[in-house]
Image: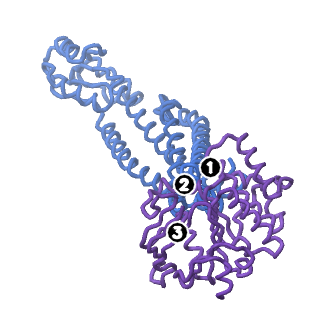
Chain colours: A blue, B purple
Amino acid sequence: MDALRRAPLVTAVAVATVFVAVLVTGLFAALLGGGERLVAAWAGDVPVSVYLVPGADLEAAREAARRIAPGRPVEAVAPREALARLRASLGEEAGALDGLGEDVLPASVEVRTSGLGPAGVRELAARLRGVPGAAEVDFGGAWLERIATLLARARAVGVALLVAVALATAVLVSNTLRLAVYARRDEIEIMKLVGATDLHVGAPFVVEGALQGLLGAGLAVGALLGASAALLPRLRGALPLAAPLTRADVLPGGLLALLLAGGTALGVAASLLSLRRFLRRA
Amino acid sequence: MIQLFHVTKQYGTDAPALSDVSLEVRKGEFVFLTGPSGAGKSTLLKLIFCAEPSTSGQILVFGRNVSRIRPSAVPHLRRAIGVVFQDFKLLPHRTVAENVAVPLEVRGLHPREVARKVAVALRGVGLDLKGGRFPLSLSGGEQQRAAVARALVGDPALLLADEPTGNLDADRTLEVMALLEAASARGTTVVVATHDRALLARHKKRVIALEAGRMVSDGDSIRRAAGS
């Protein structure tokens, strides 16, 4: 790191710029990844309920549901059991149900959907409409679908934003590195005059840019890992819905590798941008 | 070695720095390029080592038309040319030996070979004991001798010197000119740009005179000195 010795401030600014860009990108990706993981987990917890018309054959409906969703747990819920569940869920307010007949609630068939995303649940619900005697199919996932849609839009907007952030960072870092190149313009000029190729002159700057990018990205990845280690346990403690969230969900290894590679690529791109003018001049 | 055919160089809308210059320098010749400041001496040298493109005309160096040379071929052409500048152009944060080594390093020579050639070059200019010093700790004459060593270390076929004695006193001028003549005696073609008439009078060499970008005479220094 010859540049670090000769121009420590320029190096520090370049590293800090890449650090901020990679940190922002990583945070966004972590939030998006965590959100998608939670939506998938919540979707799996919500069963698809097929409510039957009065007098429908509950056993036949359960068999039909098993055929439609092979391998998935299917439970037949008789009206009496449905009422018992409602009583249990109401707790102290259960007295409000006193006096109602045992068959006031419709019979239903419940299909578990663990492992299916919102789209899979919706598709299964559509197929379960074919259960004989089905009056209504509820997968209680309209809100999940809205969150999933929101996440999909955030992803699209995020990708556009990240491209803009990457470009802005490349320009910003290239302007910073240009100071380093400018400080060594005499050396570049003399090397060119004695027959150095652009590759020979530019290679050290590109390597320095790559190292600065890698260093900035490495620090950002370290900060992201530190933040996830500190915040995830608290989030899980404060929000039971976030219980399934792990570090690998929020910051998977692939994402971390991508951030390191992206930071390095930013450093290389910035070096090439800053060198272009000087090499042309000499 | 060098051939110019009707070469013109113009910067923007200014008057041409060089106008319709044609000349030939043969292999092994020692040539002075002279004229007042702004005559076009430095511009002519820059065109020869491809630091600038000509506006029109053809320039052949080692038989290659440098007016049409690909940018990627320029470094290889320059490796056969040594250049000495009035302001030395030594890198201040590198030692004298490291400065002299630069032309060899860019060619990718083995460090051992670089060290051997640098030692020979420094001995040739009498700086073998000052290779570890930094340029700014040397006198002007010593710095110029280091610059000559850097220009000659790669055994160039052509040596271009742009006012190499412009910053030196009379004794240091003699030293540097002796080095250039020694290179010429070893077969290197030498072109020296200078406005120093005393230099022309002292060294009996071919003199090409430029004025306002035009070539006004081409002959030996004795005739030139007598005519001026």
Q: Are marks 1 and 3 in contact (CB under 8 Å)?
A: no
Q: Whole-percent x and y of residue A158?
A: 40, 48
Residue type of the residue flagged with mark 2:
Pro
Residue type of the residue flagged with mark 3:
Glu
Q: Helix or strand or loop: what does disc 3 sit on?
A: strand
In the rendered image, the residue lying farthest to the right is: B129
| Res A3 seen here | no
**Left or right: B138 as drawn, with respect to A282:** right
Please give the name of the residue rendered at 20% of the width and 24% of the height, measured from the top-left corner.
A51
Q: Residues within 10 Å of mark 2 (few under 14, many from 20)?
A: many
Please give the name of the residue rendered at 73% of the width and 75% of the height, measured from the top-left corner.
B166
The residue under label 1 is B106
**Left or right: A144 as drawn, with respect to B56:** left
Q: Are marks 2 and 1 in contact (CB under 8 Å)?
A: yes
Q: Is residue B93 above or below residue A37?
A: below
The residue under label 2 is B75
Q: Which numbered disc, 1 or 3, marks the residue that appears first in the sequence?
A: 3
Q: Whole-percent x and y of residue A206?
A: 56, 49
The residue under label 3 is B24
Q: CA distance from mark 1 to mark 3?
A: 30 Å
Q: Is residue A35 above or below residue B13?
A: above
Foreground mark, 1 or 3, reads 3
Q: CA distance from mark 3 to mark 2?
A: 23 Å
